[in-house]
Amino acid sequence: MNKGTCLVPFLPMRSKPHSDAEMVNSILFGESYEVINEDNDWLFVRVDLDAYEGWISKAGYSVFIDFNQLVDALYLEAASNGAKFFIPCGGKIPENGKFIIDGQSYAIIQKVKTNHHLPLRLRILNTAKSFLNAPYLWGGRSFMGIDCSGLVQVVYKVNGFDLPRDTAAQISTGTLVNYSEHAPCDLVFFSRINTEKVVHVGIVIDNKKVIHAGARVRINELTEEGLIVDGQLAYKTIAIKRII
């Protein structure tokens, strides 16, 4: 049991080997991981994408399969004799769209939607906007529930950029730019009003708007001072980083 592949829409990763422990991340369908250790019904794993570590339920383990095609639609639907499930954006599937789970053959119902014909910045913005109104979920990385750094990581992943999982690590990527120079697809990092610690991140849509995951994925006003939500300053701008 050295490596595994997620074969459910997403697999919760927890901070400790308990079902009531904090969910810190989620592994998407087709993403692979290395098993480092185990504790009764739990496995301590390291995700191949970003080396993120945490605990998953042993019941969720599936043997390693190398899936090679990224899903860049918000989700794809797979079916087998009436059984269906959804594969989220950022997951991976076989190139032919067919796979086997528990001895049952599944196939993708619709063709993989791509934005590959569009300019890179437009692809990134279209991907981000497809998540609008997805509910906020700490540790989430899919349309079924997503957090701010999960949104950034998945959006950039499906467009060819592998970013760290957490906001505190993402702020170390890219090139620092001044507020007056910010452009679409830049990442804006925020702190709470009375601190300097980074706690939130969003993607610039235009010179006055940012898409981010708060209570849900939404677009709000960006000012030099910070992020305006429901008419009030919700977060303070601490850095803007250019990835592309």
Image: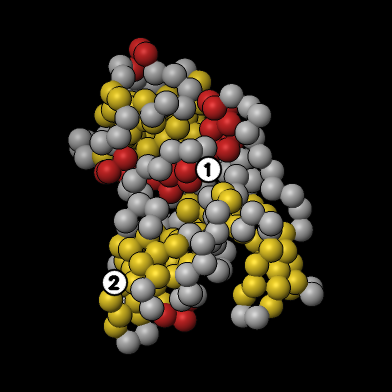
- Outermost residue to the bottom: 40
Badge 1 amino acid: Val
Who's the residue at 55% across and 54% down the image? 68
Provide residue 65's location: percent of width, then percent of height.
52, 67
Q: Which mark is residue 158?
A: 1
Question: 97 above or below 15?
Answer: above
The percent position of residue 27, horizontal first and vertical second, equals 45, 61
Q: What is the secondary structure assignment of the residue under circle 1?
A: loop
Give the quarter of the figure containing the C terminus: top left
Q: First in sequence, mark 1 or 2: give its number.
A: 2
**Which element is circle 2 on?**
strand
**Which residue is drawn at the image coordinates 52% and 42% (left, top)?**
158
Using the rendered image of the protein, determine whether residue 216 is visible from the camera's viewpoint. Answer: yes
- Estimate how packed mark 1 is, as few (under 14), some (14 to 19) or many (20 or more) residues with alpha carbons within 10 Å: many
Can you say which quadrant of the picture contains the N terminus?
Answer: bottom left
Measured as percent of width and height from the top left, residue 45 is found at 34, 68
* Side of 190 where 104 appears, left or right: right
Amino acid type, label 2: Ile
Residue 129 figure quarter = top right
Tell me, for residue 36, which label it has, or none. Answer: 2
- Check whether the beta carbons of the residues at disc 1 and disc 2 lie within 8 A of each other: no
13 or 238, nearer to the observer: 13
Are there few (<14), some (14-19), or many (20+) residues within 10 Å of tag 2?
A: some
Q: What residue is drawn where x is 52% and y is 46%?
A: 216
